[in-house]
């Protein structure tokens, strides 16, 4: 779990939209791959304000202490508490099922969250915990109960197979939160590279904005690991958890039915089609290459 520079920049991008402040609850102790000065730089780069924090808490990450090279790199990296305070939050609480990070609340999210945590947080941040919790229905119910009215939830979820119990998709978040009193959604898909992380962790990563139902076939490369950055705002309380249906398959939800056009049928005169039928697979392949290049060029950005 953790936020590297590109993910920190994405958090800042979302904070500019939602104007997060107040109380934040974080699932697990997030590793912040940045110093205090780095955070100031990323905020200035985005023309976003940050809060001057008098007391700086250093990281307590076992990962950062796991080898000498990483330990040296992370020597001045800050704790998530300091990061969220710099982002303007007044109160920071973390929740974990393990004692080694000394969380504010020691709790198994497979179980109901204490009522004292209901409607208490202006932001609940999941930096990659949900997919590792077996009872996903219960952890999601806990999250919506913890967020206060007009508060937000953010998920940073892995798209990789076998990374957790579940490989979550964007429509999972859209459909769940829409059914349970949330609105004002934002979703970005970000490529990341965990190879040679000591040298590459500061590199800008490509991302694109996801719209519900969009075709991802041209955008997700098998050579990259992909992260979902999703946020939603709570509009009303639901006393009982609403189980969603997958709106991706309901045209009323604005779903793109993906009825593909045929370049062969639509672009080649009818009398020539029998003569060129053998070239149809090649035309289809060239059309896909061109379409994917066009989509990636128009949507992919760096952050």
Image (tube, helix red, strand yellow):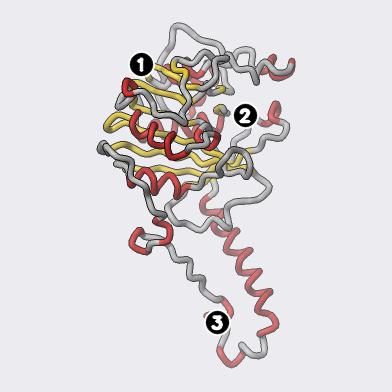
- Which residue, as the protein is rendered here, is positioned at the far front? 111
Please report contact status of discs 3 and 1: CB closer than 8 Å, yes or no. no
Where is residue 12? Give x, y as percent.
Answer: 45, 30
Q: Which residue, given by chain and number where applicable, does mark 3 sit on?
A: 265
Q: Judging from the image, what secondary structure is the residue with disc 2 in?
A: loop
Which sits in the foreground, 137 or 146? 137
Of pointers 3 and 2, the one earlier in the residue sequence: 2
For the N terminus, the image quarter is: top right
Check contact, mark 2 vs mark 1: CB within 8 A.
Answer: no
**Residue holding disc 2:** 202
Furthest residue to the top? 55
Is residue 146 depicted above or below 263 in this figure? above
Residue 198 on image: x %, y %: 70, 26
Looking at the image, residue 239 sits to the left or right of residue 272; the answer is: left
N-terminal of the pair, mark 3 or mark 1, is: 1
* Disc 1 packing (10 Å; few <14; some 14–19; many ≥20): few
Pair 2/1: label in front: 1
Quarter in which the C terminus is drawn: top right
Residue 14 % position (x, y): 41, 34
Q: Regarding mark 1 in the picture, which secondary structure is present there?
A: strand
Q: Which residue bears the numbered disc 1?
A: 90
Q: Which residue is nearer to you in this view: 269 or 233?
A: 233
Residue 203 seen in this snapshot: yes
Q: Is residue 120 above or below residue 185?
A: above
Mark drawn on residue 61: none
Residue 302 can be seen, yes or no: no
SS for callout 3: helix
In this rendering, the answer to whether 190 lies above or below 196 is: below
Instruction: Give whichever of 142, 101 is nearer the camera.
Output: 142
């Amino acid at each position: 779990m953790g936020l590297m520079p590109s993910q920190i920049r994405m958090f800042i991008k979302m904070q500019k939209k939602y104007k997060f402040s107040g109380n934040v609850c974080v699932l697990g102790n997030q590793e912040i791959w940045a110093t205090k000065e780095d955070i100031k730089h990323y905020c200035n780069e985005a023309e976003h304000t940050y809060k001057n924090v008098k007391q700086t808490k250093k990281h307590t990450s076992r990962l950062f202490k796991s080898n000498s090279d990483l330990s040296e790199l992370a020597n001045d990296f800050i704790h998530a508490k300091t990061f969220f305070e710099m982002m303007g939050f007044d109160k920071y609480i973390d929740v974990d099922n393990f004692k080694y990070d000394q969380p504010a609340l020691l709790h198994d999210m497979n179980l109901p969250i204490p009522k004292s945590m209901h409607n208490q947080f202006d932001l609940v941040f999941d930096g990659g915990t949900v997919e590792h919790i077996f009872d996903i229905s219960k952890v999601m119910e806990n999250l919506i109960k913890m967020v206060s009215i007009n508060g937000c939830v953010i998920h940073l979820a892995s798209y990789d197979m076998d990374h957790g119990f579940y490989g979550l998709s964007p429509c999972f978040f859209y459909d769940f939160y829409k059914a349970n009193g949330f609105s004002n959604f934002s979703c970005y898909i970000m490529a990341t590279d965990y190879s040679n992380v000591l040298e590459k962790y500061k590199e800008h990563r490509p991302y694109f904005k996801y719209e519900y139902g969009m075709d991802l076939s041209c955008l997700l490369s098998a050579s990259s690991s992909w992260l979902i950055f999703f946020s939603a705002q709570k509009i009303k309380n639901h006393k009982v958890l609403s189980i969603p249906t997958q709106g991706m398959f309901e045209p009323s939800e604005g779903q793109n039915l993906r009825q593909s056009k045929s370049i062969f049928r639509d672009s080649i005169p009818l009398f020539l089609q029998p003569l060129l039928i053998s070239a149809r697979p090649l035309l289809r392949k060239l059309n896909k290459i061109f379409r994917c290049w066009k989509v990636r060029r128009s949507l992919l950005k760096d952050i």
